[in-house]
Image (spheres, grey):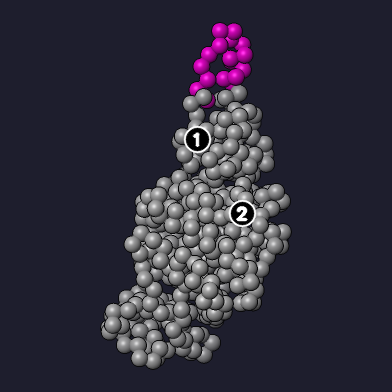
């Protein structure tokens, strides 16, 4: 049964003795799982209410309760942002509604964060670094999942098998994902504490700072790349790599050259996860939405690959013509910028770009089949799909964009990014 903000306010009053709401408004949340409201009490403080729609969503809130209890006062004091406190709960049968105490700040849209300039970039990099520097003991004490790198990769392979069984994944996408997941070099990462559901709605901003991080329902030890996927959907193509650079500056660990590729793959694979979830729930709308987005993604990727092949064929023809012309000629490829993040960065004979990733000039040779399956392209192509419903958890969250991320031994990898609405 759908609850109105006023009904959520009444639940909050029952869950927190002495709470007297004087104002209430709905707030964005994972629409498939929760109903949420923001309350204002008679002293001007704000309270957030999250009410689950089904038992699985209620279990996510129970998981967050475990996670928040595991944050010791010392851990909270060392973080550059606040972590929520649960002020009260109220159970209705299998479902438990949670009320969160006041936190300073409010969320901003992703492009609003990207427009915040170098200061916001540093804030986000510092926030991500602080999360990933949390002690793994936090996760273990909360009895939450912990994955080594190969365990994490195997888990993704199992999810791919589940998606393939549906018979609804385009064959081209299946081959692409299988190739990426079987590339063991891509998955040699150092596991860290991971927020697991990081996006702009779970960041509160106050006075140009990240004042609080919320939504700890998916806390785990795993791949730090998962916390970067949401950044890659920003309209500004440089934003994600700038935040990544700030993140590296704030951490002592060596740079992971594959992190951004895995982040983009995580965003892309969310479409398959959303499909599998829709099939499990027998939700025709979710299934149709996932199929539509994957079909669009598949068309865009194949168009990129065809464009890449045409470009390389033209370059080969230019080289052949130059070889036959003793007077030489002009090669327009000298002016071709293959860096999807920054027009000032070129791939020059394998030099390392400022994001720490080795590049290869596409003029050095044709793309192999493996390069194509990895989504390699020398062109900047962006495609957007705008479905009409908010999604949740592995939910693609309303917009899919084909973006580009650095690869270790290819020009770039064009993997679609999930954008939050």
Q: Is residue 290 above or below residue 8?
A: above
How busy is the neighbourhood of tag 1: few (under 14 within 10 Å), some, or many (20 plus)?
some
Which residue corresponds to mark 2? Answer: 253
Give the SS element for disc 2. Answer: loop
At a point 67% along the width and 41% down the height, the residue shown is 370
In which quadrant of the rendered view does residue 59 lie? bottom right
Q: Between disc 2 and disc 1, whose residue precedes?
A: 2
One can see residue 402 in this view: no
User: Where is residue 273 drawn, in percent x and y?
Assistant: 58, 63
User: Where is residue 185 drawn, in percent x and y?
Assistant: 70, 48
At a point 43% along the width and 65% down the height, the residue shown is 203
CB within 8 Å, label 2 to label 1? no
Work out which quarter of the rendered image holds the N terminus and state it.
bottom left
Magenta segment range? 317-333
Which residue corresponds to mark 1? Answer: 345
Give the SS element for disc 1. Answer: loop
Q: How many marks?
A: 2
How busy is the neighbourhood of tag 2: few (under 14 within 10 Å), some, or many (20 plus)?
few
At a point 51% along the width and 37% down the height, the residue shown is 339
Whole-number angstrom distance, CA of label 2 to CA of label 1 = 25 Å
Q: Is residue 228 magenta?
A: no
Work out which quarter of the rendered image holds the C terminus and state it.
bottom left
In which quadrant of the rendered view does residue 49 lie? bottom left
Q: Is residue 171 above or below residue 95?
A: above
Q: Nearer the viewer, mark 2 or mark 1?
A: 2
In which quadrant of the rendered view does residue 367 lie? top right
């Amino acid at each position: 049964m759908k609850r109105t903000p006023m009904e959520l306010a009444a639940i909050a009053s029952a869950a927190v003795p002495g709470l007297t709401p004087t104002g209430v408004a709905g707030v964005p949340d994972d629409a498939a799982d929760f109903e949420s409201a923001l309350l204002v009490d008679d002293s001007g403080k704000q309270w957030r209410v999250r009410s689950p729609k089904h038992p699985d969503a209620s279990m996510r809130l129970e998981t967050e309760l475990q996670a928040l209890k595991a944050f010791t006062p010392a851990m909270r004091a060392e973080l550059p942002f606040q972590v929520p406190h649960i002020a009260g709960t109220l159970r209705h049968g299998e479902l438990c509604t949670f009320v969160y105490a006041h936190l300073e700040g409010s969320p901003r849209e992703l492009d609003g964060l990207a427009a915040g300039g170098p200061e916001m970039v540093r804030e986000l990099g510092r926030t991500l670094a602080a999360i990933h520097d949390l002690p793994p003991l936090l996760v273990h004490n909360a009895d939450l999942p912990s994955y080594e790198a190969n365990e994490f990769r195997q888990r993704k392979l199992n999810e791919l098998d589940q998606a393939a069984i549906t018979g609804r994944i385009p064959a081209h996408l299946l081959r692409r994902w299988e190739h990426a997941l079987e590339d063991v070099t891509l998955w040699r990462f150092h596991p860290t504490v991971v927020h697991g559901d990081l996006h702009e709605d779970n960041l509160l901003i106050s006075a140009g700072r990240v004042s609080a991080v919320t939504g700890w329902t998916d806390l785990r030890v795993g791949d730090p790349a998962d916390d970067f996927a949401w950044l890659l959907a920003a309209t500004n193509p440089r934003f994600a790599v700038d935040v990544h650079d700030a993140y590296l500056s704030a951490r002592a660990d060596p740079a992971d050259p594959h992190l951004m590729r895995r982040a983009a793959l995580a965003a892309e694979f969310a479409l398959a996860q959303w499909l599998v979830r829709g099939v499990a729930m027998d939700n025709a709308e979710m299934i149709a939405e996932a199929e539509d987005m994957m079909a669009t993604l598949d068309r865009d990727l194949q168009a990129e690959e065809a464009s890449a092949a045409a470009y390389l064929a033209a370059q080969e023809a230019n080289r052949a013509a130059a070889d036959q012309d003793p007077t030489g000629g002009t090669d327009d490829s000298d002016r071709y910028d293959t860096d999807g993040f920054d027009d000032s960065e070129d791939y020059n004979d394998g030099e390392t770009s400022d994001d720490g990733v080795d590049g290869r000039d596409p003029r050095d040779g044709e793309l192999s089949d493996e390069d194509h399956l990895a989504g390699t392209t020398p062109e900047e192509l962006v495609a957007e799909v705008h479905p009409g419903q908010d999604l949740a958890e592995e939910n693609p969250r309303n917009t899919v964009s084909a973006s580009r991320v650095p690869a270790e031994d290819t020009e770039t990898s064009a993997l679609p990014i999930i954008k939050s609405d």
